[in-house]
Image: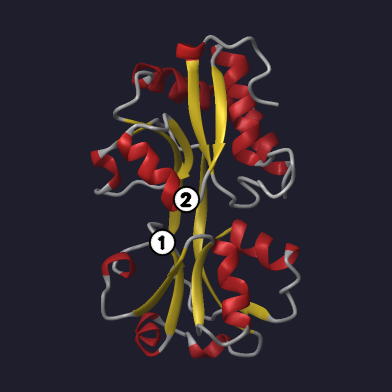
Amino acid sequence: MLLLKPVIANEIIRYGFSHWPPYGMTEQPQIYGINYDIGLELEKRLGITLQPRVCPFKRCLLELENGSLDLFSGVAKNEDREKYLAYSTPPYSAVSVVFYVRKGEANILANYNDLYKLRVGYVSKSHYFDPFNKDTAISKVDVAKEQMLLPMLSSNRIDTYVGTDPNASYEVLSKGFKGRLEKADYNPDVEVPLYFAMSRKSKHLALLDKIGRAIQDMHDDGTMKRIHDKYQ
């Protein structure tokens, strides 16, 4: 687990961790998932100490903005976030945007224009794709966590929700909604790169280049693929 090494207070890197299967699972006593395993590997390769802090996605972003968190993962780039986050390169993973509807209703969302007729659930502060992100003409319902959207859709409180795969499909399967929900016919065909990012207020900001080089090494030596394959 993280924080196995002796810790000197000023060497602790506060690592924000959201529940976002299979990247982050926080509902058990022990945190696990793709992001957690990459964190373990970064500790080993860089000799750093990561202190996980579990928080909803929106709360993690707020704490990164004010400097109470240092590091975060599973985050996409956008103009607003780049004001307070510095991103490591290259990305460590990528997700594809999907919409879910109730079983048997895949055709109610066949193209982008159909969104204007529907109540669309999404996770607050998440970045999906343009023009959706800034489209105020769509009736949007925001929630703190993606898993809240499944029962909302199943109980007709929304008509569809936007998410990203592989995590959206993982949630539908693991939470027992596979027989009640399905993907909409509309596929935006958008892939979103995911990054490690550090608060611009962090005293550890100089480590970001080393994190990026370690991530590239993990891609090159097959470690990144092995970690992802573990959760397929």
Against 185, is 192 above or below? above
Picture quarter containing residue 132? bottom left
Rendered position, 23 above or below 205:
below
Mark number displayed over residue 197: none
Q: Residue at x 46, y 74 (%)?
A: 121
Whether residue 101 is visible = no
* The disc label shown at residue 57, or none: 2
Q: Is residue 132 visible?
A: yes
* Residue bearing mark 1: 124
Q: Quadrant of residue 48?
A: top right
Q: Decide: few, some or many residues near mark 1? Use Cα within 10 Å; few <14, some 14-19, many ≥20.
A: some
Residue drawn at point x = 53 percent, y = 89 percent: 107
Q: Are marks 1 and 2 in contact (CB under 8 Å)?
A: yes
Residue 115, x across and y down, in percent: 39, 83
| Left/right of residue 84 with respect to residue 168 in the rendered view | left
**Looking at the image, is 168 positioned above or below residue 206?**
below
Count of numbered marks:
2
In the rendered structure, the answer to whether residue 141 lies left or right of residue 50 reads: left
Q: Amino acid at mark 1?
A: Ser
Indicate the position of residue 23 as horizontal and vertical percent values.
61, 46
- The residue sitting at 58% across, 12% down in the picture is 7
Residue 119, percent from left and from top: 43, 83
Asked which secondary structure carries label 1, the reply is: loop
Q: Position of residue 102 (x, y in %)?
A: 61, 84
Q: Quick one: label 1 or label 2, which is nearer the N terminus? A: 2
Q: Height in image: 103 above or below 7?
A: below
